[in-house]
Image: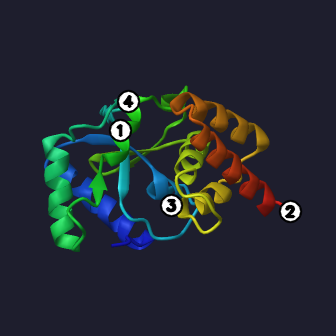
Amino acid sequence: MDISSTLLHQALEATGELLRRRGQQSAIVVVGGTALTLLGVIGRATEDVDVIALATPHEDRPPTEIRAPDPLPDMLRDAVTTVARDLRLPPDWLNTTVGSQWQTGLPPGFASRVIWEQHGGLWIGLAGRFDLIHLKLYAAADDVGPSSRHFQDLVALQPTEQDLDAARAWIANQDPSYAVADAVRQVIAHVRATRR
């Protein structure tokens, strides 16, 4: 099920409000379509909310100390389950599948570029544009071609040549195989073609 931009905002607000009413706080960092939607880069529906990190919330300042997102705190899982039921969303509408990226590492300096928003008891960290370019180029290499959602998101981020070079170097450290390098090269060629 695709989650519209309106429903996405409603679900995140409802989760934050539920946590606030319970006197609880949680902090997550999101990537993918959710981050791009909340940053105003795209307006399309997204499949789910990709949580790449948790962070330590504070009463008087934005969260700190990001870490791998598994497992989600019980209080957040409970709120997400309640919102899924109330808004008729899939049970995994907010998930940590992308958290496996911690096994090979995030782009250097990732935490310093997170943009924080507070929604009731839920802090939502949005990965920075530079990091989203890295992650979207990597994802687009798994689904090469202009029709790929990841490719379209990458183009919407308007990466510079420097952004693409940095992302390509990072991906080479993640997976040095020829197949991935060739797929990245093809994606970058498609990105360049959109500028003509």
Q: Residues within 10 Å of mark 3 (few under 14, many from 20)?
A: many
Q: Which of disc 4 and disc 2 is earlier in sequence?
A: 4
Which residue is identified by label 3?
A: 37
Residue 89 % position (x, y): 25, 69
At x 60%, y 32%, the residue is 172
Circles 4 and 1: CB atoms closer than 8 Å = yes
Residue 183 relative to residue 189: left or right: left
**Viewer-nearest of discs 3 and 2:** 2
What mark, if any, has residue 19 been given in the picture? none
Q: Which of disc 3 and disc 4 is earlier in sequence?
A: 3
User: What kind of colouring is applied to the model shown?
Assistant: rainbow
Q: How far apart are the two marked residues, 4 and 3, measured between alpha carbons?
A: 26 Å
At x 25%, y 37%, the residue is 70
Q: Residues within 10 Å of mark 1 (few under 14, many from 20)?
A: few
At x 36%, y 71%, the residue is 7
Q: How far apart are the two marked residues, 1 and 3, measured between alpha carbons?
A: 22 Å
Indicate the quadrant where residue 150 lies. bottom right
What mark, if any, has residue 196 been given in the picture? 2
Indicate the quadrant where residue 173 lies. top right
Check disc 3 and report its element: helix, strand or loop: helix
Q: Nearer the viewer, residue 109 or 147?
A: 147
Q: How far apart are the two marked residues, 3 and 2, measured between alpha carbons?
A: 26 Å
Q: Nearer the viewer, residue 14 or 21?
A: 14
Residue 113 % position (x, y): 55, 34
Q: Amino acid at mark 2?
A: Arg
Which residue is identified by label 4?
A: 103
Check disc 1 and report its element: helix, strand or loop: helix
Check disc 2 and report its element: helix, strand or loop: loop
Circles 2 and 4: CB atoms closer than 8 Å = no
